Amino acid sequence: MMSAEDIVRFSRDYDPQYFHVDAEAAKDSIFGGLVASGWHTATLTMRLLIEEGAPFADGVVGAGVDLSWPRPVRPGDSLRVEAEVVDIRASRSRKGRGVVTFLTTTKNQNGEAVQIQTAKLMVFSGERGVNQRALT
Amino acid sequence: MMSAEDIVRFSRDYDPQYFHVDAEAAKDSIFGGLVASGWHTATLTMRLLIEEGAPFADGVVGAGVDLSWPRPVRPGDSLRVEAEVVDIRASRSRKGRGVVTFLTTTKNQNGEAVQIQTAKLMVFSGERGVNQRALT
């Protein structure tokens, strides 16, 4: 669960805007209260993916990421991540490499999406002894 | 400057893959050594933007972000951010709102881009007493 303390601690280090670090002042913001930094949601999503074992044997190496935050995360929210491989392409120019398009949706306890992320991940096969499944 | 300790500390919390947390094991990764998590670069970029005073009076509220990491960040690298407003549109449906397209390039000490980010930011004007300049 995301606590107000968690939200403030992360934001002090990385995104110290008043609606992320000051619950009282945040009441007058467009959010009407304290909300988590989108970067906090993004990094927690990454941690959840790693902890739950994303299916890439040689690691999750992002070439590019497309992120949106349709709803804010508020104190007391619990987050979970749904992940789906939506496309897999072998590289034409570099043997044994490929790109996986990986869609993750981070949802709160009400099943509402708080982050939608489409990532292009580099995957490796063959000589590197890595997850062939990802390239076939 | 980004130290190996900084890279490992952040990654233990948010992106605990071996090439981000174990300098010795990282030598056998595709990076050939320890590298920072892309999320570390993204959050440091955000902090630099806030510290340097991004030109948005009511805060930097991202609706969506497009990120790429053309080169890894390694221990000893120093990062700086170049930012540019590339587009400004007033909302047709919601008076006093608009969307700014904000391009930031995070570069290392050699001037090489380590992160390119295009963000759609919500901006507010009028009744909220905010930066009109951003909407005109």
Image (spheres, coloured by chain):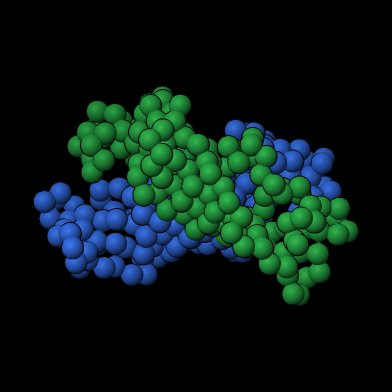
Chain colours: A blue, B green
Quadrant location, the N terminus of chain A: top right
Quadrant of residue A83 within the rendered picture: bottom left
Relative to A94, residue B12 above or below: above
Q: Residue shown at 65%/60% (left/top)?
A: B100
Above/below status of B55 relative to B63? above
Q: Classify residue B37 by image quadrant.
A: top left
**Residue A63 quadrant:** bottom left
Residue sticking out furthest to the bottom: B93
Q: Judge from the rendering whether residue A39 lies leftward or rightward of residue B121; answer left or right.
A: left
Spot occupied by residue B89 in the image (x, y as percentages of width and height): 68, 67
Relative to the observer, which residue lies in front, A64 or B54? B54
Q: Residue at x 30, y 48 (%)?
A: A59
Q: How many marks?
A: 0
Q: Position of residue A60 (x, y in %)?
A: 34, 50
Q: Position of residue A18 (x, y in %)?
A: 74, 41
Can residue B63 be seen from the camera position used here?
A: no
User: Can you give x and y, in whole percent of width and height, for residue A43 in the image?
Assistant: 50, 45
Tell me the residue at 73%/68% (across/down): B90
Seen at 29% across and 29% down, the residue is: B23
Between residues A77 and B5, which one lies in front from this camera angle?
Answer: B5
- Whether residue A136 is visible to the viewer of this picture, yes or no, is yes
User: In the rendered view, does B27 fall on the left or right side of B104?
Assistant: left
Look at the picture and state if A67 lies above or below A61: below
Q: Is residue A7 left or right of residue A124?
A: right
Q: Quadrant of the C terminus of chain A?
A: bottom left
